[in-house]
Image (tube, helix red, strand yellow):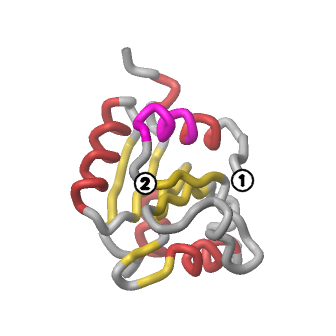
Amino acid sequence: MKNHSNTHKNILVIEDNHAILDVITLILQSEAYNVNGLSKSANYMQHIDEVRPDLLILDIMLPDADGRVLLQDLRNNHNTKDIPVLMISARYTEENLQHGEHKPNGFLAKPFDIDDLLDRIEGILAGKNYI
């Protein structure tokens, strides 16, 4: 059963692994989220301006950027500083992802359980932090 409270919630996913990006997109769309995906960080600020995401899912290891640096950029920008961010990574852990002064709202290590992903997203959208 679709959760209609998710309808019109915009999620932007920045993930360079197309298989993972596709899976996340399909799962979130099945839960009635509006999903946009990017496979690299180029022009990501432009996409944020266009999409106005309610949540950003951000991989740490991107081919053209470090997601932790992108998080710092987001937090230091007046227009994007309040967008919740869920970081995902196959290599980093919650303990060693800290880079700079800003923390994401949540973190999931890859591979992750689909239910954990959805619980984390719903919690962050409800105002909870998991870091």
Q: Is residue 32 visible?
A: yes
Residue 10 location in percent, x, y?
A: 46, 47
Residue 68, located in which quarter of the rendered image? bottom right
Rendered residue at 53%/51% (across/down): 108
Per the image, label 1 sits on a secondary structure element best described as loop
Question: In the shown orientation, is residue 18 left or right of residue 60?
Answer: left
Disc 1 packing (10 Å; few <14; some 14–19; many ≥20): few
Identify the residue under disc 2.
110
Figure quadrant of residue 27: top left
Magenta stretch, overall SS? helix
- Kindly identify the amino acid type of the residue bearing the numbered disc 1: Ile
At 48% from the left edge and 56% from the top edge, which residue is drawn? 57
Above or below: residue 82 compared with residue 108: below
In the image shown, does 66 or 30 lie closer to the viewer? 66
x, y (%) of residue 127? 71, 41
Pointer 1 residue: 131
Q: Height in image: 1 above or below 42?
A: above
Q: Is residue 32 left or right of residue 107?
A: left
Which span is picked out in magenta?
A: 113-120
Secondary element type, mark 2: loop
- Magenta region includes residue 117: yes
Residue at the image position 31 percent from the left and 68 percent from the top: 16
Q: Which mark is residue 90?
A: none
In this picture, residue 16 sits left or right of residue 97: left
Instruction: Determine if residue 53 is in view.
Output: no
